Amino acid sequence: GTYNEAVGMINKNLTLIGQDRDETVVIMHTDLYGTPPLEVAKGLVENITFIVDDTDRPADPGEDHAYAVHIDWNQSYQHNLTMRNCKFVGKNYPAVGIGTRPDSTIRFKNCEFISEQYIALFYHNSANVNYQGSGQLVVLDNCKLYSPNNAKCIIVQKCYDVDNSSEIQSLNSLFIAN
């Protein structure tokens, strides 16, 4: 079915599995940064489409905007997150926003990222001064990233220079931008 709600999985290591990626949809009609369809830090998410549709609400250029999925939490520290066979759609902003933490891996397998007007994926290393260190890894395994109206699919931002290395790996993934 289609669920009009925001799902928060920040403090718990949970498994969330949909019946079918195209038929299990979590959508929010918002442009508010604090209410994306999914906020998650660790665990497993599978077979679900997440959509943030802010086309009905004009965005305030001075505000941060919602992602379809937001992964930027201290609870990720020394934990892993796997997202399999999921689809992420952002109408005007990045479909997925990620801020990694040390000793953690965020793995996307067979996923599709679509941003109709901006970039498909926004990624940065840990921006929290209390969670600095190595082992910050994002893996895109057999994924498709689309940004049909932008020249870029991914923006990678570096936060802090002190022992705060991160890595993004792409394995057999496809990137399509304008």
Image (spheres, rainbow, N blue to C red):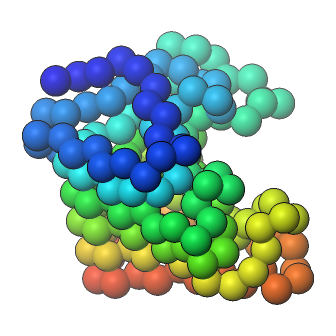
Q: Is residue 32 visible?
A: yes
Q: Nearer the viewer, residue 148 or 143?
A: 143
Give residue 40's position: percent from left, percent from top.
Answer: 49, 47
Q: Nearer the viewer, residue 77 or 177?
A: 77
Residue plotted at (43% across, 76% down):
139
Quarter of the image that includes the N terminus? top left
As displayed, is residue 175 above or below residue 11?
Answer: below
As displayed, is residue 65 above or below residue 48?
Answer: above
As displayed, is residue 75 above or below residue 80?
Answer: above
Position of residue 59 in the picture relative to residue 3 (left or right):
right
The number of callouts visible is: 0
Q: Quadrant of residue 82?
A: bottom left
Residue plotted at (46% across, 68% down):
80
Q: Is residue 87 visible?
A: no
Residue plotted at (19% across, 34% down):
24
Position of residue 132 in the picture relative to residue 26 (left or right):
right
Residue plotted at (87% across, 80% down):
161
Q: Specify the farthest residue to the top.
A: 56
Give residue 21's position: percent from left, percent from top.
Answer: 17, 44
As displayed, is residue 145 above or below residue 51?
Answer: below
Q: Nearer the viewer, residue 100 or 78?
A: 78
Give residue 92's position: percent from left, percent from top.
Answer: 54, 36
Position of residue 46 in the picture relative to residue 96 (left or right):
left
Q: Quadrant of residue 98?
A: bottom right
